[in-house]
Amino acid sequence: MLKSADNFCRQAVLYFIFIWFGIMVFAPNLLVLLASFLSRDPVWMLRLPLNLQNYRALADTKLLTVILKSLNLAFCTTLFCLLVAYPFTYFIARFAKEYRALFLMLIIVPFWTNSLIRNYALISILGDSGIVNSFLIKCGLISQPLKLLYTNLAVFIGMTYTLLPFMILPLYAVLEKLDRSLLEAAEDLGAGATAAFFRVVVPISAPGIVAGCIMVFLPALTLFYVADILGGEDSAVVGSVIRDQFTVVHNWPVGAAINIALTLFMLLLLHLYYKSGNSVDQEQPIW
Amino acid sequence: MVGRFFKYLYVSAVYLLLYVPLLVTIVFSFNDSASADTWNGFTMQWYKQLFADKSLINSAFRSLFLAAAAATCSTVIGTVIAVALHRYRFIGQKVVYGSLSVIMLSPEIIQGISLVVIFVILGIPLGFSTLLLSHTVFCFPFVTITILARLKGVSRDLAEAAADLGASDVDTVRFILIPLIVPAVFAGWLMSFTLSIDDVIISFFVGGKNYEILPLKIYSMVRTGIQPDVNALCAAMFFATFFVVMFSYRLVRTKK
């Protein structure tokens, strides 16, 4: 009697999992793939016949310029986030255990204010009469306010600010587990602090570095609202282009094609990440 | 000594950077000027204006309600999936594991587009239901992963001992596993709530005019300039969330 109830339970749960993943995870992505081969329809958004035209839009020079600029921005953002986050995370991962949870929590707290608002607040900091410029003028370093807002630099600052926690959290997952005795062993074997750091700590934390870089690089390509709020005329990112195709131009097939290209790029990065073999343990939270 | 000093200085500097925009939002909610970058003296007028503006308050409540509902749905679904992955061996298990990390790592725009395409094809009108489903989809992997990390330390012997003593599967889950994972379930709920409140891009695609949540309302105001009563609203929301979370965290802590 009990056994059959257990069995029923197992079946029900597994069916639920398959249906949930099928409808909410796999079907939507397959439909985007299908949509990228369909044609544009003014009323229904999509219609037959199938064709490859949409992917030709990717070769458009205007789009390519945006993509290259966006890749450049994402690259700079990722590098800068890594340089700032690594020492920071290394330090807090070495704090006493009872404080670590609190310090980690403090990283998440700003997220309770929507990131749109937090980026909007950067206007008060970077604007012509904003905090940075007033401070510099008061110090006598400059006489005219610097043009910071509505530039690519402002978008870079906004992206870095928004995405920094996504670099810190995966790094924390690996650095927290770092065994101190390994460093002592390195020292005993004659390694200096720098050598021990680069030859012991960095290789051990490599999975966290790669995971963090993926979690910063991909969103940095797509956070169109940061570019909208802080950027100028030519600050569009890949995400802005996709958004425009879906909501302004209403050309869903082309939007879907660009989205598929982005998805393939993501899968390539993930493939390299898992193939490198030392991925963050699958059952460990990435952040 | 110098190294120690430098270390604390550096850590504080990064925290300061993370908090400055938040502090600016709070400070400017008391600013006696509609400009976003000049300080003109203290005022409470934006808070008064805020409480007069029903549509803004309503969109904030919609956001909070959506986040709480989505966090609850994703906690239930995420917990079921975590427990199933821990207890059962089944075909496609690897695929399920893999998809969890792919969902967590995919940029929001990819998920937003794929969800809006399926909603439009299925003819589901965009609104509360689509927002709730979408937020649940992008939050549940975080719950599952948090709980799996907790279950990893739990020996299978516990479940076997329970079975030997005559407990059914359901009893084992209810009396052994669930009590063990309560802190992880709570952490997962909080994570989902946070992600849902912070989300802009997915909501932008799957949200509809008939259920306008706060980020979408603010996004539509960005180009014309945001009035400081939005700052007041965000400051108020931040403190409300902060106290609720601290309170419930305390509650869970003392129970343990």
Image (tube, coloured by chain):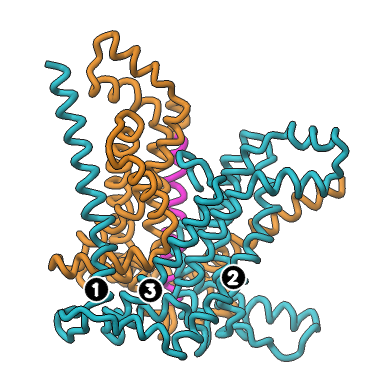
- Numbered disc 3: secondary structure: helix
* Quarter of the rendering containing residue A81: bottom right
Main SS of residues in magenta: helix
- Identify residue for label 3: B218
Which residue is located at x 61 percent, y 34 percent?
A: A98
Q: Point out the image quarter for the N terminus of chain B.
A: top right
Q: What residue type is labelled 2?
A: Phe
Q: Which disc, if any, is residue A35?
A: 1
Reply above or below: A18 against A236: above
Task: Kindly state the secondary structure of the residue where label 1 is placed.
Answer: helix
Chain A drawn colour:
cyan
Determine which residue is flagged by label 2.
A75
Which chain did the renderer colour orange?
B
Q: Are marks 3 and 1 in contact (CB under 8 Å)?
A: no
For the residue pair B253 and A43, the one nearer the viewer reads as: A43
The image position of residue B59, as x and y in percent, is 30, 66
Q: Quadrant of residue A55?
A: bottom left
- Subunit of label 1: A
Span shown in magenta: B227-250
Q: Distance between the residues labelled 3 and 1?
A: 30 Å
